[in-house]
Amino acid sequence: MSDTGEDVLEHWNRAIEQMNETMTKSVEQNMETQAKFMESWADTMEQSMPDEEMMTESFEAYNRAYSVWMNAADEMFERTVDAAEGEDVSITEFRDIWLRTANEAFKEVMGTSAFAAATGDVVETMMEIQQQTEEISQETLAQLGLPTREEVDEVAQRLVELERRQHRVEEKLDRIIEQLE
């Protein structure tokens, strides 16, 4: 075989090897992303067990999201083949495919009533924690002999009322002075 033939074969082998590596990485990333997505979804479902209708809706949404991921994997494979065949494929195109896919997949799941219920549960829990933290903070301030928010608010209200009274007294004094002059 001539040097030119060996060069072409070597180039072809490198291109195929690179395509295989890229495809393997893409499949691994796809599987990792799906696994993370599924874990997150399972955690959400575990926290608030939905009724049968919500479960059905959730599974349908997951199936649609899975379909979105599979379409992205197909698109990645096609673009990888295009790159192996010599087409100029930008790495940002691969990133854009995954970003677009993530958005589409998450929209599928986030639009379900089960996700809304789980989100509501999380917000409710966070509000309870915030209230407890506020109560502990106020108790700590009181124990340290520092003014609490309630006490500062009371002082502020009294100050505003004193300013109103002072303003009324000043107006009355101005009227009395006018009449005396």
Image: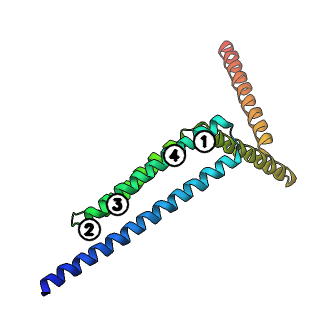
Q: Earlier in the sequence, mark 2 or mark 3?
A: 3
Which numbered mark, 2 or 1, is in the foreground of this view?
A: 2
User: Which is nearer the eye, 20 or 153?
Assistant: 20
The residue that appears at 37% across and 59% down in the rendered structure is 95
Q: Earlier in the sequence, mark 4 or mark 3?
A: 4
Mark 2 and mark 1: Cα distance apart in space: 41 Å
The residue that appears at 54% across and 46% down in the rendered structure is 62
Find out whether the residues at labels 4 and 3 contact each other: C-beta distance under 8 Å.
no
Q: Earlier in the sequence, mark 2 or mark 1?
A: 2
Mark 2 and mark 3: Cα distance apart in space: 10 Å
The residue that appears at 67% across and 43% down in the rendered structure is 123
Other residues around mark 2 within 10 Å, as few (<14) / some (14–19) / many (≥20): many
Q: Position of residue 39 (x, y in %)?
A: 61, 56
Marking on residue 84: 2
Marking on residue 77: 3
Kind of residue sitting beneath label 3: Phe
User: Which is nearer the eye, 11 or 94?
Assistant: 11
Mark 1 and mark 4: Cα distance apart in space: 15 Å
